[in-house]
Image: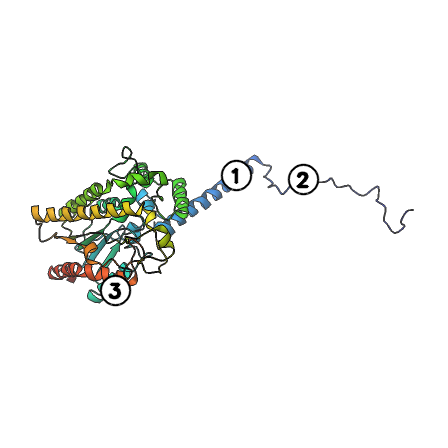
C-alpha cells in the first residue's frame, strides 16, 4: 500500500550524481595559460617565503642569528658564541670592561647549577657596570669544545680565561682503540661539525636529526653502548685533554690572555652503585633537577680512574709550563686545584660532578682570588677608565 503522504519523485527534477568516495575540494586553476603560470609562481613564492621565514626564526630563536645574516656551522654547534655577544660585540682590552671568559661543560651551564649566578653576583658588586661575563660552558662539552671555541675567538682579548673540563672527556674512552681519534672525531658530534664547517652552511636535516638525538638522550655524545664500556678500562683521554689544554695555553700566551686552568672536582663514593644512586642511598644531596648517574659517562670505576689521570695530566701540564717558562706579566698562568680544594661531600655534590647551591658558592669562593687578581691588574692598567 502506497503512503499518500510520501512525495513521489518528479520526473523533471534534476538528478545529482553521487560523489566518489574520498573526493574533496580541489583548487581551480585559471583557464588562461598566463594566469595559471602567474598563480603557480605566486604559490611557489609563498611556500618558499614560509620556509625561509621558518628557517630564519629557527636560527634567530635558537642561536641569535640576525635575519640579515646566514647561519654557519658555528651557530649550530656553538650557539653561545653569539648568545654571549662575542660575534656582534667582540671582547677587547680597549672596551673599558673587564671581560671574563668561561670554558667548560654543564657545571658552568646556568641550566645545571649556580656557578655563573654566583660569579655574576660578585662581579656586579666589585665592578658594577664595568664587566662582561662570557660563559661558553654547555652541557656535554669537553676540552675539545673549549679548544675549538677559543681558537675561533682569535681576534678577541680577555682579561681572564677560565677553563674547567674533565668528566665529559671520559665518555670518549668508550671506543675501540683502533677507532679512537685524538681529536675526538670518532664521536659523531665532532665528525659532523668538521663536515659542516667544510660545507659552510649547516644542513637543517642534520640539525633536526641532532635535535631528535638530544631529546632522546641527555648526553650530546650519546650514552655509552654496553658492549663498549670495557674499552674505557685503559683511558686515552688524559693524553687528549692535556693536548687540548696545552694548545689553549699556547693561544692564551700569544694573545696575552691571563689563563686559569682548573682541575676537575668530582665525587663518586666508594660504595657507588647505580641502584644505590637511584634509591638515594649515597652521599649526595638528594635534590636537584639535573642529576646524572655515573653511567652516563661509563662504568663508575673507569670514570673515576680516568678522572684521576686527567687531573694528574692537568697538574703536570701547568706545573711544567710554570717551571719551564714563567710567562709574561701580561699573560699569567694559574693552576687551581679545584678537585683538591672542594670537599667531596653530599653538601657540595648532587651527583658525580654537578653542584648544589652551596657547592656552587664554594666553587666561586675558591676561584675568586684568581678573578680578583685579574681585576686588580685590569684596574691598575687604566683600561677601566676608557
The total number of labels drawn is: 3
Q: Along the line of sight, which residue is nearer the eye, 355 or 155?
A: 355
Q: Earlier in the sequence, mark 1 or mark 2?
A: 2
Q: Earlier in the sequence, mark 1 or mark 3?
A: 1
Residue indicated by mark 3: 121
Residue 182 falls in image quadrant:
top left
Distance from disc 1 to disc 3, alpha carbons, whole Å, reads: 58 Å
* Residue drawn where x is 40% and y is 44% of the image: 213
Image position, residue 194 (x, y; %)? 29, 38
Element at label 1: helix
Q: Along the line of sight, which residue is nearer the eye, 126 or 289?
A: 289
Residue indicated by mark 1: 40
Residue indicated by mark 2: 21
Q: Along the line of sight, which residue is nearer the eye, 140 or 191?
A: 140
Q: Earlier in the sequence, mark 3 or mark 2?
A: 2
Task: Give the side of residue 355 with respect to residue 54, left or right.
Answer: left
Please identify, in this view, whether the residue under mark 1 or under mark 2 is nearer the observer: 2
Distance from disc 3 to disc 2, alpha carbons, whole Å, reads: 68 Å
Element at label 2: loop
Which residue is situated farthest in the front direction here?
271
Amino acid at each position: 500500500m502506497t503512503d499518500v503522504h510520501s512525495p513521489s519523485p518528479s520526473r523533471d527534477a534534476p538528478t545529482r550524481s553521487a560523489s566518489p568516495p574520498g573526493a574533496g575540494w580541489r583548487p581551480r586553476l585559471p583557464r588562461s595559460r598566463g594566469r595559471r603560470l602567474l598563480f603557480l609562481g605566486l604559490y611557489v613564492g609563498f611556500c618558499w617565503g614560509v620556509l625561509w621565514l621558518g628557517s630564519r626564526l629557527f636560527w634567530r630563536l635558537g642561536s641569535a642569528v640576525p635575519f640579515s645574516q646566514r647561519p654557519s656551522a658555528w651557530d649550530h654547534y656553538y650557539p653561545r658564541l653569539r648568545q654571549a655577544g662575542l660575534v656582534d660585540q667582540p671582547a677587547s682590552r680597549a672596551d673599558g670592561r673587564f671581560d671574563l671568559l668561561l670554558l667548560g661543560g654543564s657545571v658552568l651551564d646556568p641550566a645545571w647549577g649556580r656557578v655563573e649566578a654566583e660569579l655574576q653576583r660578585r662581579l656586579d658588586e666589585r665592578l658594577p657596570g664595568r664587566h662582561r661575563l662570557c660563559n661558553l660552558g654547555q652541557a656535554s662539552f669537553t676540552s675539545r669544545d673549549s679548544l675549538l671555541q677559543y681558537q675561533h675567538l682569535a681576534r678577541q682579548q680577555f682579561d681572564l680565561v677560565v677553563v674547567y673540563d674533565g668528566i665529559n672527556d671520559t665518555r670518549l674512552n668508550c671506543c675501540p682503540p683502533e677507532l679512537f681519534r685524538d681529536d675526538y672525531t670518532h664521536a659523531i658530534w665532532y665528525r659532523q661539525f668538521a663536515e659542516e664547517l667544510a660545507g659552510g652552511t649547516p644542513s637543517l636535516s642534520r640539525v633536526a636529526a641532532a635535535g631528535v638525538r638530544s631529546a632522546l638522550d641527555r648526553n650530546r655524545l650519546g650514552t655509552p653502548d654496553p658492549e663498549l664500556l670495557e674499552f674505557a678500562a685503559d683511558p686515552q683521554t688524559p693524553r687528549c685533554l692535556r693536548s687540548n689544554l696545552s694548545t689553549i695555553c699556547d693561544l692564551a700566551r700569544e694573545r696575552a690572555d691571563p689563563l686559569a686552568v682548573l682541575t676537575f672536582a668530582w665525587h663518586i663514593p666508594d660504595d657507588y652503585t647505580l641502584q644505590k644512586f637511584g634509591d638515594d642511598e649515597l652521599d649526595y644531596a638528594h635534590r636537584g633537577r639535573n642529576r646524572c648517574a655515573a653511567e652516563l659517562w661509563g662504568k663508575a670505576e673507569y670514570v673515576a680512574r680516568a678522572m684521576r689521570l686527567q687531573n694528574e695530566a692537568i697538574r703536570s701540564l701547568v706545573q711544567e709550563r710554570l717551571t719551564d717558562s714563567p710567562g709574561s706579566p701580561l699573560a699569567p698562568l694559574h693552576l687551581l686545584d679545584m678537585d683538591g680544594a672542594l670537599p667531596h661531600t653530599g653538601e657540595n655534590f648532587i651527583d658525580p660532578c654537578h653542584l648544589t647551591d652551596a657547592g656552587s658558592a664554594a666553587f666561586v669562593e675558591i676561584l675568586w682570588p684568581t678573578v680578583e687578581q685579574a681585576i686588580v691588574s685590569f684596574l691598575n692598567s687604566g683600561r677601566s677608565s676608557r
